[in-house]
Image (tube, rainbow, N blue to C red):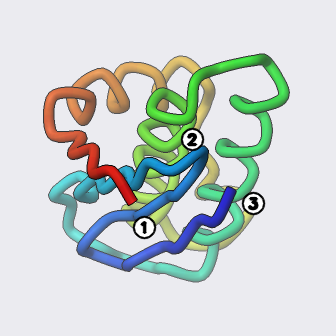
Amino acid sequence: MVVATLGRDGAFAAAAGIGYRLPALEVEARDTVGAGDAFAGALVAALDRGEAVEAALALATAAGSIACTRPGAQAALPSRHETSLAAAQLQSALARTPL
C-alpha cells in the first residue's frame, strides 16, 4: 500500500492495483501541525482493526481534517467517534481507479 496526503485536496492510496482518491473535509484550518499525525494514526489503527482500505482512508482523512481545526498537536486529535461521524460524510466522495 502506498498513501499520500494532499493537504486541502485530501488523500490518495494505492493498494492491490486500485487507486483511491478522497477529498478532505472542508474546514477552516487553524493549525496544521498535528494533521499528519492524526491522519497516520487513524489510518494505521483502522487497518489494524481490519477495516477496508476505503474505510481506513476515509477515517484518516477525516481525522487529519478535524485536527486542522484545533490548535496544537496532541490536543487537536479528534476522538474515534468524532472521526467516524466525519468519515461517513466522505464515503460518497471516494473515487476508485484501476492502476
Q: Position of residue 2 (x, y in %)?
A: 64, 65
| Marks 1 and 3 close (CB-CB < 8 Å) | no
Amino acid type, callout 2: Pro
Q: Is residue 32 left or right of residue 89?
A: right
Q: Which mark is residue 78?
A: 2
Q: Is residue 7 above or below residue 64?
A: below
The alpha-carbon separation of the residues under discs 1 and 2 comes to 10 Å
Q: Which residue is mark 1?
A: 68
The reply to whether discs 2 and 3 touch (Cβ–Cβ < 8 Å) is: no
Residue furthest right in the image? 48
Q: Nearer the viewer, residue 67 or 93?
A: 93
Upstream in sequence: badge 1 or badge 3: 1
Local secondary structure at mark 2? loop
User: Could you give the CA–CA distance between mark 1 and mark 3, rounded to whole angstroms?
Assistant: 12 Å
Viewer-closest of 81 and 8: 8
**Residue neighbourhood size for the residue with mark 2, other residues' Cα within 10 Å, grouped as few (<14), some (14–19), many (≥20):** many
**Residue 49: horizontal and vertical position, in percent?**
79, 18
Nearest to the observer: residue 11 or residue 37: 11
Give x and y (percent) for residue 5: 48, 73
Q: Nearer the viewer, residue 89 or 49?
A: 49
Quadrant of the image for the C terminus? bottom left
Q: Amino acid at mark 1?
A: Cys
At a point 26% along the width and 28% down the height, the residue shown is 91
Which numbered circle lies on residue 74? 3
Label 3 amino acid? Gln
Number of residues whose C-alpha sits closer than 10 Å to that of mark 3, classed few (under 14), some (14–19) or many (20 or more): some
